[in-house]
Structure formats: C-alpha cells, structure tokens
Image (cartoon, rainbow, N blue to C red):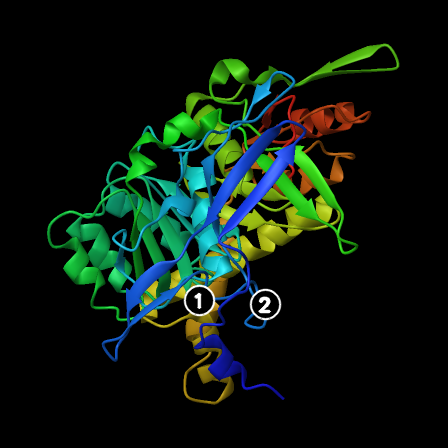
Amino acid sequence: MADLKKMYSTILGDHFPLEMKISFDDQTLLYRKKTWKIHMDDGSVDERGVRYGENPDQEAALYELVNGNLTLGDCQFIAPGNGLVSSVTVEDMLQVGKHPGKINLTDIDNGLNIIKYLMDRPAAAILKHNNPCGVALGDLLSLAYDKANRADRIAAFGGCVVLNRACDKSTATAISENYLEVVVAPDFEDGALEILQGRKNLRVIKISRIDRLADFEKFRFVDFKSLIDGGIIVQQSAVNSIRSVNDLKPAVSAFKGTEYRVNREPNQRELDDMLFGWAVEHGVTSNSVIYVKNGCTVGIGTGEQDRVGVAEIAVQKAYIKYADILCFDKHGIPYGEMALEIQQGKRNGSDKEGIDQQTQADKAGLPGSVMISDAFFPFRDGADVGINQGVSAILQAGGSLRDFETIEACNEAKPQVAMKYTGQRSFKH
C-alpha cells in the first residue's frame, strides 16, 4: 500500500507540455503552462508546476491563456491579459508553504467566482473542496471574515479564504487564529503579512486584479468537461443576470385558469439577502439550497439529487454549526469535543443539554432568513422545509408546473412568506 502521508508531502511533477493549443476552426487559443521557482527549506530552488491533481497520484498542470481570441456566434470569450489564478507569479506567492495543488487553485477560483458579485462591500468567502462553507459581507473586512468563519467554523478548518479588500492587521490576526490552507487578497497592509507568516505552511497569495474583479461579471470563458471515453463537452460559462432588485420577477403562476400570486412583497433587507444569496449560489454545486441572513450564509446544502433533501440537509447543517459556535463561544471547545468528553465521563451532560436547548429554541438562527434555491421547486415540499424553520422570504428560479403550490405555501405561512423569481437557474456541476 502506498504511503499516503508521504504522497501528500511529495511534489509529483508532471509530463504535460509547456504549451497547449486549442483550435476552433480558424481560431486558435494558445496556453502556456505555469511553473514557479520556489526556494526550498534546504536552500535549493525547485521549479515546478501544480503539486498534483485532485489526488496525490494524479499529475496536473495549470495553463494560462497567452494568445488568441475566440468569438462564437454573438459571444466573445475572455481575452489574454485578464488572468487571475492562472497569472499568479512566484512573487505573488508571499508565503509559499507548499506548491499549490489542483484543489487549492480551484478553491481560489471559485472564491473569486463568488466574490466578483460582491465587490461593493468588504466580503470574505471561505471554501473547501470547491464549495463555500461560509460567505459574508461586513462593514469592515475583519467583520466579514469573522461572520464567514462563524457560519461554519467546522468546515472552514483547512479551507481557503478569499478576500475582496486588502488584508489588514485585524483580519490577519483573526485568520491566524484558525487553521487554513490558503489566504488570497488583492494586497496586504503593513504588518498583516508578518502576522500570517506565523503560520508556517499557510499559502499567502496576492492577486492584485481582485480590485477589478467586478469587470469579470460579464466575461465568458470556455468551460470544458472531459468524459471517461476521452470525449469533451464544451459550454459557455454561466453569467449571473440577477444583479439588482429590478432583475427580480414577481412570483405569479397560473393553473387551470386561476392566477396565483404571493401576497407579501419582500422588504429591503430580504431583497438585499436575495441578491447576496443568488451571488453565492453561483459557486455552490447543484442541486443546492442555501439560507442567508443579513449578508451571511446560515446553512448551505450542496450537490444533492432532490430539492427537498438538499433543503433538509442545509437545515441540518445550520443546526450543527449553530450548536458548535454556541459551544465554542461559551466553553472554548468544539461541540463534538464536548460530546466526546461527556461520553468519556469527563464532563457533565448538562453543558451539552443547555446548548441543544438553545439551538432548538433559536432554530439555529434560521427564522427570518432567506431561502435560496438554484432552480425551481417541483413541489411545495422543498419550500415547506424552509417555511417550517421560519424563513421570511424565498428566491427561486420559477417555472415549475406546480409553482402555484409553492405560492400557496408562502401565503398560508404565519406570518406570510415573501417570494421572488429569478427566471434563471444557477446549476453548477
């Protein structure tokens, strides 16, 4: 059996060529492989590319688009000179730790994919395995990071944080108190980098173009999906078209000659959370349902086959994370560690009972949140999951034959639940 621990600490190397060309009839895109000359602990300089792929036994390479433009139909795709992750230089790696692997790079990329819609205010996105664990806005960057971290302190362990403002000392201090793999920001203020460098293996990366990230909202790129037989599916990248309240559509449906309409309109806080939540949804693996409140994720359900199931999973996760943060705030230990100590007879069970009771009483902070679904609800049961937890508003694509049932569910709720449609779904696989 292979020594997995040794594999994780080994730079695999790769046999991919230095250049790659992709031709679409008479249009050719030229890509160049990224390598970085990194100073090793023994004083040597090692020039390598991506550490390894999704697993330690998979070779991988990162390519940057360096020449060529592509226009297909009415769509002009992203041009060279706009690199983000693919343009990172060794000078941008302010602290290397280890050569980045494929998962590190795709986590950064998906963090940018979310943050690009949230550039108006300080924002932080923490990701793990290419899904967000916590995303939040804040009046200060440190507050945005703290909210994102507290949204799912468990999953954030070993994650990647992407910031949309220069990392200041306050934010760096908060980050340094947790175990993370990667920190990415457009810049690092005086003293911030020194704080982060206290974490020896933390990768600290500067991507200066983050301050222009809003420009990437409308950029299209060619999205490739390789099949096990060597075939390739090609598609245009998705674009979020819900960028203002005016883009939202009324929740109206007709069934057997009867028109159904949601009675209550969302208030301004709910509208803001709808726009925020839909931006986050563009970085969540489908099927997905998320709950957001006051510019912060409360529960994130990802990658499930049925919509009611993923709505329930998001609720379950919200309860687990809420109990954990209550425990951590009050006792300074994770909820799971407390449960183990009680099982081992080292702690009185009343501590856990108090946390469980508070979590149930607060419904994990879900009351008043906005439920976001990346596609329509085929039946009302998915929406009922959120309504039963006290959500005050719902945003979904609309377009189901049974939309009227979901409208009825909102109107029957006490208090009534507001709902809007996007007219756009946000699948990501």
Q: Which mark is residue 179?
A: none
Report the Cα–Cα distance between label 1 and label 2: 47 Å
Q: Which three-letter amino acid code belongs to the residue tagged 2?
A: Gln
Q: Position of residue 108 (x, y in %)?
A: 43, 50
> Which residue is drawn at the image coordinates 61% and 42% (left, top)?
289
Residue nearest the viewer, comparing 229 with 275: 229
Q: Mark 2: few, some, or many residues within 10 Å (few <14, many ≥20)?
A: few
Question: Which one is closest to the eye, mark 1 or mark 2?
Answer: 2
Element class at badge 2: loop
Q: Residue tagged by mark 1?
A: 354
> Which residue is drawn at the image coordinates 51% and 85% (left, top)?
343
As drawn, 413 above or below 347: above
Q: Position of residue 394 (x, y in %)?
A: 59, 31
| Residue 192 quadrant | bottom left
> Which residue is drawn at the image coordinates 31% and 62% (left, top)?
37
Left or right side of 308 for 31: left
Q: Mark 1: few, some, or many residues within 10 Å (few <14, many ≥20)?
A: few
Q: Position of residue 157 (x, y in %)?
A: 41, 65
| Residue 123 quadrant | top left
Element class at badge 1: helix
How many numbered callouts?
2
Name the N-terminal-most of marks 1 and 2. Answer: 2
Can residue 360 be seen from the camera position used here? no
Q: Residue tagged by mark 2?
A: 58
Q: Which three-letter amino acid code belongs to the residue tagged 1?
A: Gly
User: Image quadrant for the N terminus?
Assistant: bottom right
User: Image quadrant for the C terminus?
Assistant: top right
> Which residue is drawn at the image coordinates 26% and 39% (left, top)?
165
